[in-house]
Image: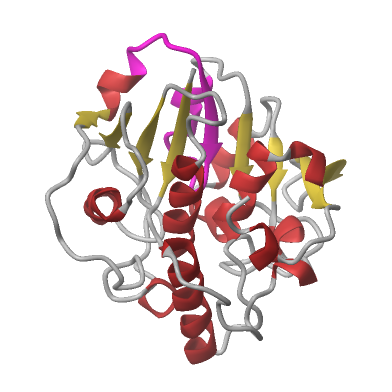
Amino acid sequence: MELVLFCDYGLDDAAATADALMHLYEDGYSGATLVAVGGNVPAEVALRNAKKLAAALSCPLGGVRIADTTMFPQPSEYLTAVHGKDGMGDLFAEAPCPVPVVPFAEWLREEEPFDLLSLGPMTLVPRALAKAPRKFVFMGGNVAEKPNFRGYEFNHALNRAAFSECVKYPHVAVTMDTCRHPLFNIQEKAAPREGLLYRIAERCRALTLTSGERGCYLWDDIAVKALRHPSWFSSEQARDKDGNLLSVAHYRYGKQYYEILEE
């Protein structure tokens, strides 16, 4: 069983990937594919950032690989105020990539079972859903929370048609409503200790203080928590402004984000 992450490699994608890979084998996975997609940055930058992140990780990476999607047209922005000049917080140096890089089309031809985490725009996700993943968790969308990009949540906004197609499949939706929980907001408190996840969180926090954003949430890592710890969340059926029916996860565990960061 493989874990597949679609990531547009901003800072919260880096945190989510590090979190998921730190627990990969204890969660019963044999490996992971990091599908680098366009969104926070163009696909070619996401690919470069995925390689830099893999080089920086200290956890075992056996069975881990990166999928290159740059041959597919994809929408993207370049949100330097939110994610730094390189799109991933300017935290990671260029270094030889320690894991193989394969074409996304090659991964699509495989038939191994997998769980799917979508943490960016869903342009290419329908191709993965056609392969029938065991579980499908995504970060995206909003119901009651104020949107943050062109009248929608960012991942939804960049490809509304793909989003509407994907949510027809059984899913867990980690929406803006899920993420903007007071216990997930780390803006008022510096990271309490050292370590890669805390360094990423602190960089996210520093950028929100500079940009003037209200609150700091590591959006994509909350989706990792929802996949790994479903008992921490309840579920509610709700429709968004486009009429999509979402199975929205709501945090019920009661611990502050830094308390669960490495759990």
- Residue at left 57%, top 30%? 27
Residue furthest toward the front?
Answer: 193
Q: Which residues are magenta?
A: 108-129
- Residue at left 71%, top 40%? 229
Across and down, in percent, residue 1 comes to 49, 17
Q: Nearer the viewer, residue 142 or 21?
A: 21
Across and down, in percent, residue 235 comes to 85, 41
Across and down, in percent, residue 215 comes to 65, 79
Q: Nearer the viewer, residue 81 or 127?
A: 81
30 with respect to 243 (left or right)? left
On whether residue 34 falls in the magenta region, the answer is no
263 with respect to 204 (left or right)? right
86 with respect to 258 (left or right)? left
258 over 110 or under it: above or below: below
Looking at the image, what colour scheme do you see? secondary structure
On whether residue 126 falls in the magenta region, the answer is yes
Q: Quadrant for residue 178, please give it.
A: bottom right
195 with respect to 61 (left or right)? right
Q: Is residue 120 visible?
A: no
Residue furthest toward the left?
Answer: 96
Across and down, in percent, residue 65 comes to 29, 32
Q: Quadrant for residue 154, please give it.
A: bottom right
165 over 133 or under it: above or below: below
- Residue at left 36%, top 45%? 37
Q: Is residue 207 visible?
A: yes
